[in-house]
Image (cartoon, rainbow, N blue to C red):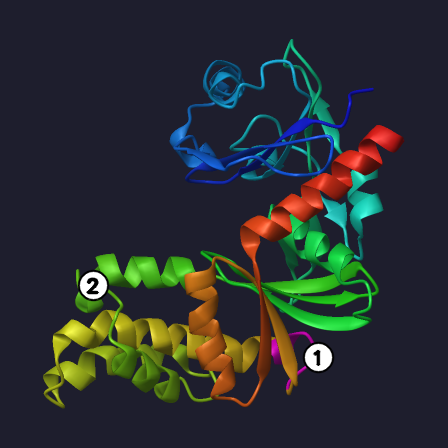
Amino acid sequence: MSDGTFLACDWGTTNVRAWVVGANGEAGPEREFPLGVGRLRPGEAAVRFREEIRPGMNAEALPALLCGMIGSTLGWTPVPYVDCPADLPTLARALATVQDGRAPVRIVPGLRGPGAFGGGDVMRGEETQILGWAACEPEEALRLVCHPGTHAKWAVVRDGRLERFVTAMTGELYAVLRRHGVLKTEAPADDEAAFVEGLEAAGDGGALSSRLFTARARVVADGRSAAGTSSYLSGLLIGAEVAALPALLDMPQPQEVTLIGEPALCRRYEVALARRRVETRTRDGDWAVLQGLRALEALAEGA
């Protein structure tokens, strides 16, 4: 048994965010490492953790708890998914322990659930944030949660359990369209008017491939500035997502959505949802993942 101090890591595809969490539950300063699983060779994660992350955090002898893509086939070791519905105790019982040679290293499993179109759906990392938030707001009996990102997740949370979810590849689609094809642009997405124009063009979210071409047509047919294409495209994609995704979870007209994630990106979703007269509450993703990792570490130590 440790004194409660541990190394917490949210290990994604592009980077690792790490904190040392003290015995009192307080987290030290965040440090980011450019060691996401998408940048590593097979088998390299354990070495980089031991040689860079541990010494970089002065945490050579601390137990560690890792969530995110580090538990995928691209990461340290594949950790089986847990089926929905699931809560924090469910995740704690399925933590995987890997060999590090210093102190225990546990990896949080991802979640698996039935998809919206007959197949399955999966998440890794978002479950720790969503259930970490839910543990801090136990009075919320039923919530619709949106976690914006490269692969945005929409989830139904009831009484602290994540019941079902659906994924939208909004962020990845935006990145691909900006870099390739006729919508390719280097301009930043900072034109608020073009973003709102894109939200309006999203309509009900249907016929998205046709709606996407309006990003090109507005420039070549309507004489609009190409500098606004990136912002317009962002609005169009986010607008289509917020219009269509709640219905896939049998909540077509939500009164309120909880947003969990990176604040700047959440603000774009706040604007999109407000235009549909949906209220929002936003929680920072770093705060949420720390809540989840703290709770899981306590459950694991108490087992």
Span shown in magenta: 246-252
SS at badge 1: loop
Quarter of the figure with residue 52: top left
- Find out whether residue 250 is within the magenta segment: yes
Identify the residue at horizontal 72%, vertical 63% (top origin): 164
Upstream in the sequence, badge 2 or badge 1? Answer: 2
The amino acid beneath tag 1 is Asp
Residue 74 placed where, x, y %?
51, 33
- Residue positioned most to the top: 101
Identify the residue at horizontal 19%, vertical 84% (top origin): 217
Identify the residue at horizontal 58%, vertical 85% (top origin): 278
Residue tagged by mark 1?
250
In the displayed structure image, the side of residue 97 where residue 18 appears, left or right: left
Quadrant of the snapshot with the N terminus:
top right
SS at badge 2: helix
Residue 25 placed where, x, y %?
71, 38
Residue 266 placed where, x, y %?
48, 66
Quarter of the figure with residue 145: bottom right
- Along the line of sight, which residue is nearer the eye, 281 or 47? 281
Number of the front mark, 2 or 1:
1
Residue tagged by mark 2?
181
- Find out whether residue 294 is within the magenta segment: no
Q: Is residue 165 above or below residue 196?
A: above
The amino acid beneath tag 2 is Gly
In the displayed structure image, the side of residue 107 where residue 50 appears, left or right: left
Q: Is residue 96 visible?
A: yes
